């Protein structure tokens, strides 16, 4: 690197050195400013210093490379030429804003320093030029305060104290009561404070100011808050931030000036309507800070909110119209919903920022579908834009409409969904309650990045202050948790740990409910309702189903599960764990009788009692699945799971079963295993007790015949043998199944087509897949057990130490959540290849928990499985993830 490296990229005047593609070098803000300039939009001219420079600056002991000074000099001259101003001139001074801007939006870094370039002389020039000394000195004191805080490290509050003291002394209520002379006096006091604290005067040389500000902005990349944020959001440390310097434009030059933030569509619902807020005669930070009530941008919003204050649309129709057409142009250009900031200075519109707008999960879905319907993106892009995991949030509860709501207060509906929990006021208390497994609502006067750890564990966020773009609102939307912000009527006392509304007082630990969709704060815990799926959801799912290759089945053992899975679009049952059908109160006795039976004959007698129950269950499942495939797995768990373990229970159960306590105890004793998960379970039970297989098979076929007759639809039972590792195990069990099936069908005089297959959940089974496939018509990967046995870690106990592994960086992902593609995944690939070699039409699926995990689903697509199977609520997630996996595979193949 050296002279030739370009560290500084200019923009403005209808052109730019950079473009939107250069985010990693120019940061999001810098790249988009360049792009807007290239599009010919009115952007105050400026320049961006690159993230490369940041990395170099931090690595080289906070020093700058040769040649940087010249590059900045040239860039400043260019800004000067475009604005007809000169940096440091005492005639027409150029004033700058400086802002950090990383590749992704990242709170915790330096926000902004405005009015850079003001000193004792240039402030006079500004006063003269604007004819407004009050404005000039107010700008100067704001600059000293921001610079003093950010660059010189003097506590903000010290400046605020001076201001408050003067206001008290002079009897002023509001900042606007202060005149030019008052601000001038404050400027002197501020300068004295700095000199007092630092033994050095406030820098009057504008270039000293500039370099000080640049260094502080780069350094803010390594502030404690920024580091924490990056850690929480997996943002690499070595990205660095860019720095943007830009000619100042003033939204606070009088009543023909204003500043605003806007979204091109609703960030809450996704509805296609301009949303936003503005302040007349104010600077940008005033809107974000939320300490002055912002007004509605559009006439429509004003009417909806019943506000008497005119909207920007009514006050400045010409500029509003110009802004609307810019919105349209930018949406078409970026093909997405955007978040915009602009300022009107003396009637002239300036675009300050654009970026892809943050949005709720619900809005993301609606926007993706609408953009595709409007022709801005195609359907595949729309499908790719929705995070499958976000559907979880759409399936979140809302407050039951019938429920009685004792409304305490109203705030802004900042992030949708409803949540109930114990009230806490401090992030550390949120963590403390959450660690005890309690739901919490974190209530703050307003939130800041320091509160993030508390927000993360909270079910909902409530703030007394702050607008729709406040920290709490933005962060909660990003996290997908409900939030009510700016509930102005509540008073929060951190000291007393109370929330007060009028005479009502809520204390720490009290139960509250918030409704982030309406902004209501409600006393107590209110009943919730299952969410309704929107028409955009249904449309997206239609597209998804047209794209995906893999089928999605469900893991269901009860009629209720099967019904909801069908509603969510399941295409059959991928796993019915029959053991779950025996745990019910009314069935467990028959099961226990069967287990303690000490002869095959006694066992058969007990099994006879179970048969009608099983048959009835299967009939219902077949009926609900109306012709779709249903995989029924033979009994899998170690039998001791059905027997009591507590002495008191043993006594009661022995009485019920008509055996002595001693007999039952000794049966339990003989069944004891040191390692039950590697013990007498799965097909091993079927080999020891073939009469169990016979009973289950009989129940399945009698039910299938019955359901087929009732529904008139073909029934497709697939019988699955668990925990096979040797081909002959499967052979043995399959023979029992086939014989029993043949007998039942012969008696009925009708046949039912069926398949017999196996789970692949042991490494040996994967390796022996070729031989096993000679006997199996389908494989279903039981990745819970396969992960357990491949790693040799217990699926029931591993969580305790896997969290240490994750923290220590030994593993990146819990292998029980996302498939370990390297190890478990390789075994699966082997099994697929060898299985298909023996039987080309072998049906392949997955029914471990991974079947509902988007990353694992992508892996399943890559290895060519036919379907994934997951719990009912994850079916929509799996459908979307499967479609995305198909699109990714096509894209790879291009
Ligand atoms: C598996 O092991 O992945 C599986 C689906 O079976 P179970 O969880 O019932 O052991
Ligand atoms: Mg298993």
Image: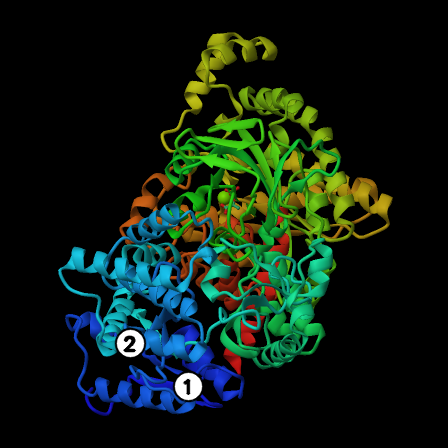
Looking at the rendered structure, the number of numbered marks drawn on it comes to 2
Q: Nearer the viewer, residue 472 or 625?
A: 472
Q: Quadrant of residue 468?
A: bottom right
Classify 10 Å Cα crowding around label 1: few (below 14), some (14-19), many (20 and above): many
276 vs 579: above or below: below
| Residue 577 can be seen, yes or no | no
Classify 10 Å Cα crowding around label 2: few (below 14), some (14-19), many (20 and above): some
State the image coordinates of residue 610 (x, y, percent, origin top left).
68, 27
State the image coordinates of residue 483 (x, y, percent, origin top left).
55, 47
Mark 1 sits on what residue?
11
Secondary structure found at label 1: strand
Q: Nearer the viewer, residue 118 or 152?
A: 118
Residue at image position (50%, 13%) is 650
Residue at image position (15%, 64%) is 200
Which quarter shows the N terminus?
A: bottom left
State the image coordinates of residue 544 (x, y, percent, origin top left).
66, 65
Secondary structure found at label 2: loop
Q: Is residue 427 left or right of residue 41?
A: left
Q: Quadrant of residue 124?
A: bottom left
Mark 2 sits on what residue?
121
State the image coordinates of residue 729 (x, y, percent, origin top left).
50, 45
Q: In whole angstroms, how far apart are the C-alphas of marks 2 and 1?
A: 28 Å
Identify the image's colour scheme: rainbow, by chain, secondary structure or one colour.
rainbow
């Amino acid at each position: 690197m050296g002279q030739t490296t370009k560290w500084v990229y200019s923009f403005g005047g209808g052109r730019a050195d950079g473009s939107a593609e250069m985010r990693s070098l120019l940061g999001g803000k810098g790249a988009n400013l360049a792009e807007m300039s290239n599009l010919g939009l009115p952007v105050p001219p400026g320049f961006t210093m690159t993230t490369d420079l940041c990395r170099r600056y931090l690595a080289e002991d906070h020093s700058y490379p040769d040649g940087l000074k010249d590059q900045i000099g040239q860039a400043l001259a260019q800004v000067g030429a475009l604005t007809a101003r000169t940096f440091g001139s005492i005639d027409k001074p150029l004033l700058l804003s400086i802002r950090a801007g990383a590749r992704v939006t990242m709170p915790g870094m330096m926000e902004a320093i405005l009015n850079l370039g003001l000193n004792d002389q240039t402030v006079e020039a500004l006063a003269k030029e604007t004819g407004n000394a009050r404005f000039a000195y107010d700008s100067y004191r704001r600059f000293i305060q921001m610079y003093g805080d950010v660059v010189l490290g003097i506590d903000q509050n010290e400046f605020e104290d001076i201001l408050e003291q003067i206001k008290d002394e002079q009897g002023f209520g509001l900042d606007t009561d202060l005149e030019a002379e008052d601000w001038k006096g404050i400027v002197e006091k501020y300068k004295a404070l700095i000199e007092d604290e630092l033994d050095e005067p406030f820098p009057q040389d504008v270039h000293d100011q500039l370099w000080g500000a640049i260094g502080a902005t780069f350094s803010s990349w390594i502030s404690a808050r920024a580091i924490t944020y990056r850690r929480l959001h997996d943002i690499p440390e070595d990205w660095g931030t860019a720095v943007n310097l830009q000619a100042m434009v003033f939204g606070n030059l009088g009543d023909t000036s204003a500043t605003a933030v806007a979204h091109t569509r609703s960030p809450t619902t996704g509805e296609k309507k301009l949303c936003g807020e503005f302040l007349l005669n104010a600077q940008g930070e005033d809107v974000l800070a939320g300490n002055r009530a912002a007004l509605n941008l559009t006439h429509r919003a004003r009417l909806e909110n019943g506000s008497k204050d005119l909207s920007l649309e009514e006050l400045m129709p010409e500029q509003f119209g110009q802004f609307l057409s810019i919105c349209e142009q930018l949406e078409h250009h970026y093909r997405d919903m955007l978040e915009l900031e602009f300022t009107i200075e003396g009637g002239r519109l300036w675009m300050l920022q654009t970026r892809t707008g943050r949005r709720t999960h619900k809005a993301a879905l609606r926007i993706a579908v609408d953009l595709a319907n409007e022709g801005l993106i195609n359907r595949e892009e729309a499908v790719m834009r929705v995070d499958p995991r976000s559907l979880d949030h759409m399936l979140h509860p809302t407050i039951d409409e019938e429920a009685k709501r004792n409304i305490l207060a109203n705030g802004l509906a900042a992030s949708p969904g409803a949540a109930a929990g114990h009230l806490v006021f401090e992030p550390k208390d949120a963590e403390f309650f959450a660690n005890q497994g309690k739901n919490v609502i974190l209530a703050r006067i307003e939130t800041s990045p320091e509160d993030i750890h508390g927000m993360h564990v909270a079910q909902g966020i409530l703030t007394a202050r702050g607008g729709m773009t406040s920290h709490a609102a933005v962060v909660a939307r990003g996290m997908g948790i409900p939030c009510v912000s700016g509930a102005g009527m509540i008073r929060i006392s951190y000291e007393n740990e109370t929330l007060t509304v009028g005479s009502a007082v809520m204390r720490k630990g009290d139960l509250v409910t918030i409704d982030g969709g309406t902004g209501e704060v409600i006393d107590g815990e209110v009943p919730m309702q299952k969410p309704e799926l929107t028409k955009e959801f249904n449309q997206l799912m239609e597209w998804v189903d047209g794209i995906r290759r893999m089928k999605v089945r469900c893991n269901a053992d009860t009629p209720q599960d099967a019904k909801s899975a069908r509603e969510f679009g399941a295409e059959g049952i991928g796993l019915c764990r029959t053991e779950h059908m025996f745990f019910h109160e009314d069935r467990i006795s028959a099961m226990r009788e069967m287990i303690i039976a000490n002869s095959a004959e006694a066992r058969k007698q007990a099994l006879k009692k179970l048969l009608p129950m099983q048959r009835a269950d299967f009939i219902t499942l077949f009926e609900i699945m109306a012709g779709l495939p249903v995989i029924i797995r033979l009994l899998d768990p170690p039998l001791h799971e059905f027997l009591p373990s507590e002495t008191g229970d043993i006594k009661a159960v022995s009485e019920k079963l008509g055996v002595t306590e001693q007999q039952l105890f000794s049966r339990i004793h003989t069944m004891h295993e040191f390692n039950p998960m590697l013990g007498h379970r799965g097909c091993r039970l079927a080999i020891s007790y073939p009469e169990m297989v016979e009973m289950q098979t009989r129940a399945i076929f009698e039910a299938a015949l019955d359901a087929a007759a009732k529904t008139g639809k073909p029934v497709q039972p697939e019988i699955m043998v668990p925990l096979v590792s040797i081909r002959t195990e499967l052979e043995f069990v399959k023979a029992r199944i086939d014989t029993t099936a043949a007998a039942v069908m012969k008696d009925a005089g009708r046949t039912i087509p069926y398949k017999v297959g196996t789970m692949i959940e042991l490494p040996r089974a994967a390796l022996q897949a070729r031989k096993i496939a000679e006997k199996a018509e389908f494989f279903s990967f039981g990745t819970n057990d396969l992960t357990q046995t491949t790693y040799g870690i217990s699926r029931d106990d591993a969580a305790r130490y896997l969290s240490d592994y994750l923290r220590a960086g030994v593993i990146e992902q819990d292998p029980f959540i996302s498939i370990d593609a390297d190890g478990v995944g390789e075994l699966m690939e082997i099994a697929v290849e060898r299985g298909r070699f023996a039987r080309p039409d072998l049906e392949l699926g997955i029914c471990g928990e991974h079947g509902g995990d988007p990353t694992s689903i992508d892996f399943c697509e890559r290895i060519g499985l036919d379907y994934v199977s997951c719990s009912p609520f994850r079916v929509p997630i799996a459908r979307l993830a499967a479609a995305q996996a198909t699109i990714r595979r096509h894209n790879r193949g291009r």
